[in-house]
Amino acid sequence: MSESHKDDVVKTTGNEQALSDNVKVNKQLKTITISLIVIALVWVFILNPVITFKKNESALASAGKRYFETFTSELPTGERISDVTLQKLYEKGYITTDFYVPYLPLSKKTCSVTDSWVKVKKVDGVYKYYTYLKCGTLSSLVDHKGPRVALNGDKEITVNLNDKWKDPGIKKIKDTKDGEIDVEKATIKGEVDTSKLGTYKISYIAFDSMKNRTEVVRTVKVVQPLNDTVKKATENTGYYMGLDPDNYIYFSGMLFRIVDIDGKNVRIVADQDVANVDHDGISKWLDYYYEHINENSKKYIVKNKYCSMTLADTDTNASKCSSYTKKLNVYIPSVVDVNRAQTEEGNFMKPTTMSWVAEKQDEKNSYLTRNRFYEEGYGKDFMSFESKYNFGVRPILTIKGDVLITRGKGTRENPYEIGDFQKANPSDKVNTRQSGEYIDISGLIYRIVDVASDGATKVVAEFTIFEGLTNRTLEYDYTLKDQTYNPTVKGNVGYKINNYTSQYIDTKYFVKHEIEVPIYKEDAQYKKEIKTIKYKTKIFAPNTYEMFSASNESTAMRSYWLLNSSQKESLKYGVSDIGVVLYGDTTKYISFGIRPTAYLDKNCIIVSGDGTEDKPYKIEK
């Protein structure tokens, strides 16, 4: 090997050795760095927090002792224990520096001022001090937890209205230091009044020998299940009878009457006719009605089968059903429902108007009921009429029987409520409310029908317009060629209603809006119009098939025009003084009253009221 080559080998070997030495040095430096970091972390997150905590704990103990040495009257006697909290020591100036959670120095989160304390107890004639400091996850080792309190029964109990209540009490009290503690030493606070609906709290408070406190709360709900209420009110028959039992219930913003219990669920019927509909069109019309039920209220509705039979006149006293519909969301009452509710005093299922029941006499005729018939119908409970005619419809539906009554007593003035919807708050827009709620507009009461796509709210007056005690009536000018309802032609009832009504009522909240007038070939029947004509108008007559267009059975309600029209020249539609749709050829110069129907400005807001008939909403814009 040449000398130069030997030199190269020596140089290479030397470089490799230097590189190896550098690697070793770097590893040693890395190890030292990691060790220093670990030591720093241990110091920051373990040693220093513990040292700081112990320092604060000692300061708390010293301050507490000085406090009791100053306020000797607060020192305990006998087996009693006295305590002073960190907060009080701050307030009294015994501690002037805040104690912060050692792990979180940058957050400035302080130690608990209410859970940290110093207690003093006399042991063998000498006062002994106990200190407890709570700082985040760090806390003193002294006994600071109260005993475990186990209750008899559940922590949440439901009790029916007016049922007897006896507190189940405490099962056991046990402490980790003292063992079992006599349950009689516990303090019980709170009472339950089962005569009033509501949620009640009962507190069970226990202490251990260190006076560590434990409080366990039991919640007792006094409720009124709907089906249980019906059973009790009907003396377990399950169905209401008579003229005016306390069976009113508020549902989806509308007033209903409870009919009976069907299995475990409850059937309810509208308090009054909602519209006048031909019997042949009722099934389709009920779909329209169901659409106007509040969406949340629909969650309470149970599909059900309803009685619907074909009967001869001699069989209308039936008390049992032989034929049922398929399962439906909503239907109408049957003769069985009406018959079963009858007593010598009367029958809440019979209206003062003429209202359809489910039964048919034959393919052409169907039955209706009324509280009193005259002439050939005297003494009858039911009469048959051609199914094409328009009479009242009172929807019946089934709701869950296990729902809880949230308020009310079942009277008309204070009906049951089940919390299926919320009443409006002041400043809510009217167009956010639901079908059926009541509005007071300058002293005249209206009901919400529905809300148009442009935000205007359709309303119909609950009563006709009066001058003193006289019903304000209008008649057609029979010299006109076209006798269908038309608000643009002078002499037409539609024109008179739109132009003359403002003389009698306040219309400042109403806006002009498009309406549709249905035209029939002869008789008006639901969904059987041959055409509709659109007009833009402010005040108009109700449509017999729309929500709340039927008479409300009040003696203050008189006759009123309907906008439904026929191509048959002299056929007009209105509701008579007894709440029945007038059908057939009318004589000339016949008069009906005005029941204003209109659209509210979309900016109208509610300022007060509950939306009920007794406390209607009041509005402004």
Image (tube, rainbow, N blue to C red):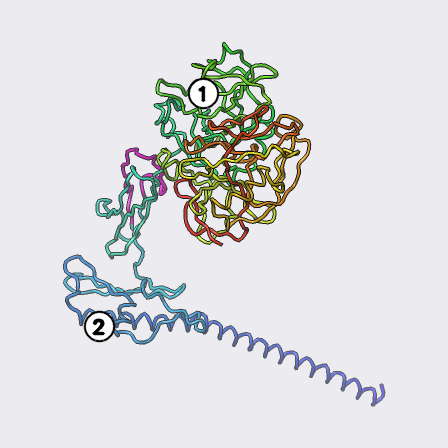
Q: Secondary structure at mark 1?
A: helix
Q: What residue is shown at x 52% (from left), y 75% (from top)?
A: 37
Q: Secondary structure at mark 2?
A: helix
The amino acid on which the numbered mark 2 sits, given as a three-letter code, is: Arg
The quarter of the picture where residue 495 lies is top right
Closer to the eye: label 1 or 2: 1
For the N terminus, the quadrant is: bottom right
| 527 relative position to 129: left or right | right
Residue 448 versus residue 266 in the image, above or below: below
Q: What residue is shown at x 42% (from left), y 32% (from top)?
A: 554
| 138 relative position to 428: left or right | left
Taking the magenta stretch, the answer to whether it contains residue 161 is: yes
Mark 1–mark 2 Cα distance, whole angstroms, equals: 85 Å
| 239 relative position to 330: left or right | left
Toward the right, the furthest residue is 2
Q: Which residues are magenta?
A: 151-174
Q: Are marks 1 and 2 in contact (CB under 8 Å)?
A: no
- The circle drawn on residue 338 is 1
The amino acid on which the numbered mark 1 sits, given as a three-letter code, is: Val
Taking the magenta stretch, the answer to whether it contains residue 619 is: no
Q: Which residue is mark 2?
A: 66
98 and 452: which one is in front?
A: 452
Return the disc, 1 or 2, that comes first in the chain's sequence. Answer: 2
143 and 248: which one is in front?
A: 248
